[in-house]
Amino acid sequence: MPQVSLYLNEKTYAKVRRAAEAESVSISKWVSKRLDRAIAADWPEGYGELFGSIVDDSFKAPPRDAFISDAKRKRL
C-alpha cells in the first residue's frame, strides 16, 4: 500500500490525533477514511430515500404566471 507524508501545524495535528482517539483508530486510518469520504463521487448514504420524505401542506409550488403581463417582443 502506498504511503503519504503530511505536514500539519501543531494545532491541526492535535485535532486529528484527538479525533482518531475518539474513534479508537490510528491517525493513518482516520485520515484515510476522511480522504476516501472527501473524494467519493457518490451521494451520501440514504440520499435517494429523502425524495418525498417531507409531508407538510405548507410546501406548495408557487402559482405560475400566464405571461399575460409579459412585455411584447419583436419576432426575429
Image: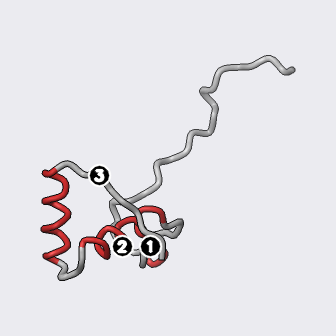
Which one is earlier in the sequence, the residue at label 1 or at label 3?
3
Mark 1 residue crowding within 10 angstroms, few (<14) / some (14–19) / many (20+): few
Classed neighbour count for the residue bearing mark 2: other residues with Cα under 10 Å, few (<14), some (14–19), many (≥20):
few
In the rendered picture of this protein, how many numbered marks are placed on residues? 3
At horizontal 47% and vertical 54% (from top left) the residue drawn is 61
Residues at discs 1 and 3 in contact (Cβ within 8 Å): no
- Residue occupied by mark 1: 47
Residue 75: quarter of image: top right
Which amino acid type is marked by label 1?
A: Tyr
For residue 45, which quarter of the picture? bottom left
Q: Nearer the viewer, residue 34 or 11?
A: 11
Q: Secondary structure at mark 2?
A: helix
Q: Residue at x 14, y 75 (%)?
A: 21
Picture coordinates of residue 66 (x, y %)?
62, 39
The alpha-carbon separation of the residues under discs 1 and 2 comes to: 20 Å
Image height check: is 38 above or below 74? below
Which of the image's four quarters has the C terminus?
A: top right
Q: Is residue 53 left or right of residue 1?
A: left
Give the structural element (helix, strand or loop) at label 1. Answer: helix
Tell me the number on the disc at residue 7.
Answer: 3
Task: Tell me where residue 34 appears, x and y as whole percent.
Answer: 34, 67
Q: Residue shown at 41%/68% (left/top)?
A: 37
Q: CA separation, marks 1 and 3?
A: 34 Å
Distance from label 2 to label 3 (Cα)?
18 Å
| Residue 20 rendering spot, x and y as whole percentages | 20, 73
Residue bearing the label numbered 2? 33
Q: Earlier in the sequence, mark 2 or mark 3?
A: 3
